[in-house]
């Protein structure tokens, strides 16, 4: 089972307009992926359309969202079904500041149906930090039976390490995403993460050609191993 569960659609202002549900599903198929997730910034509004498109190729879709917390830390939240992701996403959106998107600067925020028809456009800027703290967002994710994973911890911006310098002990995180997996050993040796911390690596694709770039085998050390196993019955 190969997965890439950090992908942005045309709903994210920074996501390319070609990142439509059908194009993403088609590229995932070409990349040989079995499981994918959309993780748009602070919204899960395109997940349902993607699930329908991916279903045509037999690709499973996990409900996802990349929350930008009050501290400007990116947190990946996953749910075994798209409905729960949408419910969680609506709470996150309610906690966004009332800052309107300026599409000429940030890009468009398109919601599409399974035929890639634009059905609506989000007005509030989705890349803003929401009002929920990291701890509140993790707890809310767990209350909705989701899994919370620190996004791209080895990046210099919007990562828990770049903002806090460490993984806060009091937060019950389900795993970490390491963009460049070759850095995992150094993170363990420096004591930043424990050797048994579940980890994953994904493309964080904002453009079609990057989908599947950092696809990963779903093994027991993957933070979503149980969720994906239950979803696909295939591990
Ligand atoms: Zn991010
Ligand atoms: Zn991302």
Image (cartoon, rainbow, N blue to C red):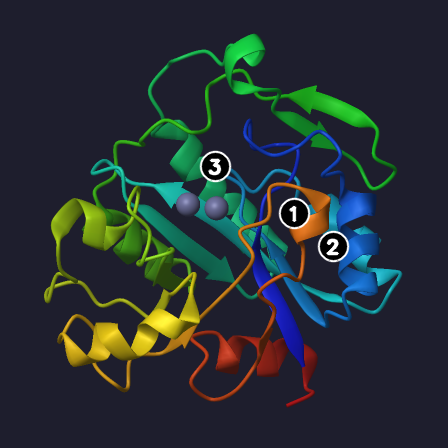
The spot of residue 42 in percent (x, y) is: 45, 37
Q: Is residue 191 above or below residue 132?
A: below
Q: Residue at x 71, y 39 (%)?
A: 19
In percent of width and height, residue 3 lies at 63, 70
Alpha carbon distance from label 3 to label 2: 18 Å
Vertical order, 66 against 197 (above or below): above
Q: Nearer the viewer, mark 1 or mark 3?
A: 1
Q: Residue at x 75, y 49 (%)?
A: 24
Find residue 90 and name its label: 3
Direction from residue 25 to residue 157 in the image, left or right: left
Secondary-structure class at tag 2 = helix
The residue that label 2 is drawn on is: 51
Whether pointer 2 and pointer 1 mark residues with C-beta atoms closer than 8 Å, the reply is yes
Label 2 to label 1, Cα distance in Å? 6 Å
Establish whether ligand 2 lies closer than 8 Å to the Cβ of label 3: no
Q: Residues within 10 Å of mark 1 (few under 14, many from 20)?
A: many
Task: Give the mark nearer the N terminus: 1 vs 3.
Answer: 1
Task: Identify which residue is drawn at 73% across, 69% down.
Answer: 33
- The image quadrant where one finds the N terminus is bottom right
Image quadrant in which you'd find residue 45: top right
Residue 86: image x %, image y %?
Answer: 55, 45
The mark closer to the camera, 3 or 2, is: 2
Task: In this rendered view, identify the residue nearer to me: 162 or 63.
Answer: 162
Q: Taking 232 as reference, is 40 left or right?
A: left
Quarter-of-image position of residue 214? bottom right
């Amino acid at each position: 089972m190969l997965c890439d569960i950090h992908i942005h659609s045309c709903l994210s202002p920074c996501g390319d307009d070609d990142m439509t549900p059908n194009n993403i599903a088609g590229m995932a198929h070409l990349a040989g992926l079995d499981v994918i997730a959309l993780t748009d910034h602070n919204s899960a509004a395109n997940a349902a359309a993607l699930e329908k498109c991916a279903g045509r190729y037999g690709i499973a879709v996990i409900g996802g969202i990349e929350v930008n917390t009050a501290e400007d830390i990116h947190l990946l939240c996953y749910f075994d079904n798209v409905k729960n992701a949408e419910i969680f996403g609506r709470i996150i959106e309610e906690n966004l500041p009332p800052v309107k998107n300026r599409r000429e600067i940030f890009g468009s925020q398109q919601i599409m149906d399974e035929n890639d028809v634009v059905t609506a456009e989000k007005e509030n800027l989705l890349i803003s930090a929401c009002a929920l703290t990291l701890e509140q967002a993790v707890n809310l994710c767990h209350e909705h039976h989701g899994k919370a994973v620190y996004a791209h911890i080895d990046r210099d911006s919007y990562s828990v390490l770049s903002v806090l310098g460490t993984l806060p002990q009091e937060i019950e995180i389900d795993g970490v995403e390491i963009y460049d997996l070759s850095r995992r050993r150094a993170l363990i040796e420096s004591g930043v993460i424990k050797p048994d911390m579940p980890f994953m690596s994904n493309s964080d694709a904002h453009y079609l050609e990057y989908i599947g770039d950092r696809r990963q085998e779903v093994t027991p050390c993957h933070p979503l191993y149980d969720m994906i196993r239950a979803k696909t019955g295939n591990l």
